[in-house]
Amino acid sequence: MRAIVFFLSILWLAGCASLSTFEQPRVSVTDIRLRGGNLLAQEFLVTLRVDNPNAYGFKINGAVSDILLNGHPVARGLSNQPLDIPAYGSATVKVIALVQTLDVLRQLMELGTRQAIDYQVKGHLSVARGWSRDIRIPFEEHGSLDFWRFVGEQAIPRPLTE
């Protein structure tokens, strides 16, 4: 009986040791597009790229992202898109973020005639572990964009494709 307990303890410790070699994936924002909307709210499609530096793949169960303009939250995005990330590979996750028009208008009024807007996209991915709770992988990206140019590019009518 002691031999079985000893053997199971060794297996358990070996499993814990393999988890400690998990290197955190890198998450970056690769695209933010206006998807559509109405008078009160707009939807943005946020594309995240997940790079896996590990020798084994893993599965993402979902993602949460927040969009901030000049430090103020204006949108929250959610995705329940399951995704397999291959070993030493990458994949993209699409997150739909809902923006309340009044929140954005408040931010624009604070800006006045300023051209650049500081943005921040932050959140986390939920990585499946199978036998235990998911691991949260945080990410954050920030920068500046010319809001009026961004809106102008999104508003250009494009021909329908079939």
Image (cartoon, rainbow, N blue to C red):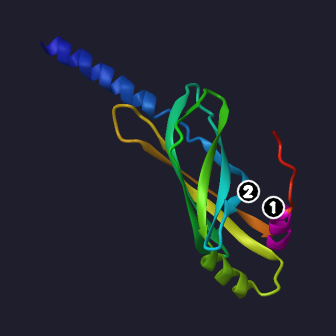
Q: Is residue 151 visible?
A: yes
Q: Give how far across and how far down residue 131 sits, in percent.
A: 34, 32
On the image, numbered disc 2 is attached to which residue? Answer: 33
Part of the protein shown in magenta: 147-155
- Look at the numbered discs 2 and 1 and tell me whether their residues touch, using CB distance below 8 Å: yes
On residue 62, the disc is: none
Q: Give how far across and how far down residue 6 sits, in percent.
A: 22, 18
Residue at 61% x, 27% y is 86
**Of pointers 2 and 1, the one earlier in the residue sequence:** 2
Residue closest to the eye, 113 or 14: 113
Q: How many marks?
A: 2
What kind of secondary structure does the magenta stretch mostly adopt?
Answer: helix
Residue at 30% x, 20% y is 10
Residue at 63% x, 75% y is 101
Residue 101: in magenta span: no
Residue at 81% x, 82% y is 114
Could you classify mark 1 by the number of other residues whose Cα lies within 10 Å: few (under 14), some (14-19), or many (20 or more)?
A: some
**Is 162 situated left or right of 81 in this image?**
right
Q: Give how far across and how far down residue 58 sits, in percent.
A: 52, 31
Cα separation between marks 2 and 1: 7 Å
**Is 21 situated left or right of 109 in this image?**
left
On residue 154, the disc is: 1
Q: Amino acid at mark 1?
A: Gln
Q: Give how far across and how far down residue 148 sits, in percent.
A: 83, 73
Residue 153: in magenta span: yes
**For the N terminus, which image quadrant?**
top left
The vertical placement of 8 against 162, above or below, is: above
